Amino acid sequence: MTTLAQSIEMHTDWPARLLPQAPKWLAEFRADSWQQALNQQPPRFPKIDYRDWPLFDLKAIPPHIDVPGNLVRKAQAVVTLGRKTIKIDLPADLIAQGVVVCDLEEAMTTRAALFEKYFRKCFSNKAQDGLALWQAALVNSGLFIYIPKNVHLSSALKILQLQDSRQEENFINLMIIVLETGAQAEISQEVSTLGDCANAADLRTVIFADADSTLTYTVLDTLSAKTSAHIYRKSQLDQDARVQSTFVEMNQGNVVSEFYSDLLGSGSNAETKVVAITAGKQTQGINTKITNYARHSVGNIVQHGVLLDESKLVFNGIGRIIKGAHAAYSQQENRLLMLSEFVQGDANPILLIDENDVIAGHAASIGQVDRQQLYYLLSRGLTKSKAQSLLVKGFLAESLSEISDKAIADYAIFLIERSLFNG
Amino acid sequence: MDKLEIKNLHVCIENEETKQRDEILKGVNLLLRTGETHAIMGPNGTGKSTLSETIMGNPKYQVTEGEILLNGHNILQDSVDQRARLGLFLAMQYPVEIKGITNAEFMRAAINARRPEKSPMSIREFLSDLDQNLALLNMPESMADRYLNEGFSGGEKKRNEILQLMMIRPKFAILDEIDSGLDIDALKVVAKGVNTMASPDFGTLMITHYQRLLNYIHPDQVHVMMDGRIVKTGDASLAEKLEAEGYAGLRDELGIQVDLVDDDQIANQGGQAS
Ligand SMILES: Nc1ncnc2c1ncn2[C@@H]1O[C@H](COP(=O)(O)OP(=O)(O)OP(=O)(O)O)[C@@H](O)[C@H]1O
Ligand SMILES: [Mg+2]
């Protein structure tokens, strides 16, 4: 296990080594970030201690190895494996309308100005924490998605990203999603691991939702038991923009997540739903925050988690209303269902409110399976594990049933059942 | 022919506040065979639901003495789901609501729990069965897609219990006040549902307060339960007698020492009858 500072000292030239093809501005940006990171700590989160996780171990850069042939045939339009782009199938009409979906390398060269603008914005925060600087310095793969003004994607854009753990390799991935004014899109993303080496993963998505744009963003994360990960997903919403995010966290290893929305424009509306399952001895710590900067902005957080075995799951739900955000709305719900007596669950609603004429509230619950419900199911002959899996599905139904990408919803349910039957 | 036999059953329940254990069933004996229909009647609070829940294996109830034999096999050590798969079914007095699980997926799971894992019932077969039974019970098809009992009216919940019974086809069904909360037409429909189950391979134990149900589902035997025991057994005419005379008369005739909740009321009725 290496700390951030140790890692920087041991690998001074790694920003350049991890992305040798970076243009000059980017190479400098990365080197600067790496320098700054030396004086920054990774952020602290309530109840989540990830200091002992090997998030900052850098591995020698391996050569690309073969790509399994079946990846090209996956249903998703976009498939990536580690640092490699397997395919990007974008319908011709979207290309004609100016939609861009490409990997970072291509964005750097063919969309240089656009990419630079948004990349810098991704890391423009003055006081970057250690994790953000790590990302800025080392990102080695990713996607750039750009939907021009008033363009509506007629069908969902589906993306599959695989961490390549067939060998030791860092997976530091950035996805930039830009929706210009009035654009509309549905994007669903599945992130998983191929192979069983122990690796760290660092995933970042930054969404720029310009005025009047609408995005439905669904992610299913299924990183492997041997992956320790940091996941950061943030959206910035301008006036009357709407972003509905659903994050289904079915990773098997230790994961610390930050899911943030900044309601910058008046009337903007963000909803973040999180569904998480923890099993074995893993920990997932999830920080979900919506900040209302603007008047009449609306933020909703709904988090449902299920804990099995000896696992730990923490939901920190943060609703923050900045002074001046009159008539803002901030609501959150955090619920945990514990299926074993050895689990550790925490649901912490945190409301930070600096304005008076606002509506804010929260609901939280931590509990076990309802005995009467379980008895009813058993009395019809269902085995205990089947009955429990139905009750878990029931508990998560509200969140899962609203996932528009049915393939993701069904796969999530399949994974829930599998984790319950293994237990 | 299958046999469900209850021998000298004593059951306690622990009062959650006082932690005191109260004996509710005080030696129940009963023999039910497939092909037969039995009814149990008795005043409120005498232990009828306790008996049915204990047969099903509800962990709230502790058996302190006696046995429950299914074809000679003592099922007291079997879990609730095992008992169900052995062929027992309890239509509950108060079915629970479960959000997020649809009625249809629940019933499919219940049916498939009784089949080998490798050969679940085909969806087509399931749906045709389901449609047929829904129609027989005058239930709209949409009921199958609603969450289990969630927001169902009292009568709809009862119908739904019978729907499950018809889909699952157990050997023995215990129907705990399946008639309560049903309007007159619904009562007929539910009875029709139960009657379609009639076969030499199916036995019913009905718990009811009203003789009316027995007009529609004809019992071979009627048992009267008081103070945790079956105190009298007879044919359908026993129910008619009870309906006319109330429980106090029978209690006094048998010399049982027990307070009935509504003694004043019963005394009045008795006065009028004599
Ligand atoms: N969970 C419980 N906790 C405490 N007492 C209970 C519990 N369940 C049953 N009892 C008591 O046991 C006794 C028998 O109850 P039971 O429900 O078996 O009666 P019943 O004959 O079904 O009555 P009814 O006709 O009203 O349905 C009652 O005095 C009741 O209060
Ligand atoms: Mg009762």
Image (tube, coloured by chain):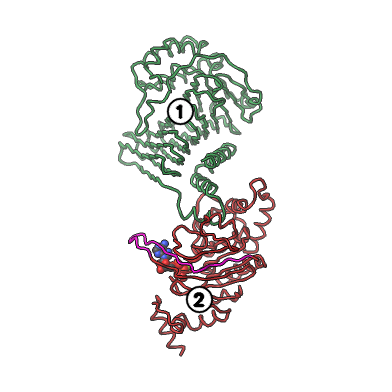
Whether A32 is drawn above or below A118: the answer is above
The quadrant of the image that shows the N terminus of chain A is top left
Q: Say which of A324 and A43 sits in front.
A: A43
Instruction: Classify 10 Å Cα crowding around label 1: few (below 14), some (14-19), many (20 and above).
Output: some
Residue A111: percent from the left, percent from the top? Answer: 54, 16
Q: Main secondary structure of the magenta part?
A: strand
Q: Position of residue A339 (x, y in %)?
A: 45, 44
Q: Residue at x 65, y 62 (%)?
A: B135
Q: Say what amino acid the circle numbered 2 marks.
A: Val
The residue that mark 2 highlights is B224
Where residue B25 sits, quadrant-wise, is bottom left
Up-down relation of residue B269 to residue B49 (above or below): below
| Chain B palette colour | red
**Mark 2 surroundings: few (<14), some (14-19) or many (≥20) residues within 10 A:** many
Please identify which colour was used for chain A in the image.
Answer: green
Q: Is residue A404 left or right of residue A254?
A: right
Residue A189 counted in the magenta span:
no
**Residue under circle 1?**
A231
Against A363, is B182 above or below? below
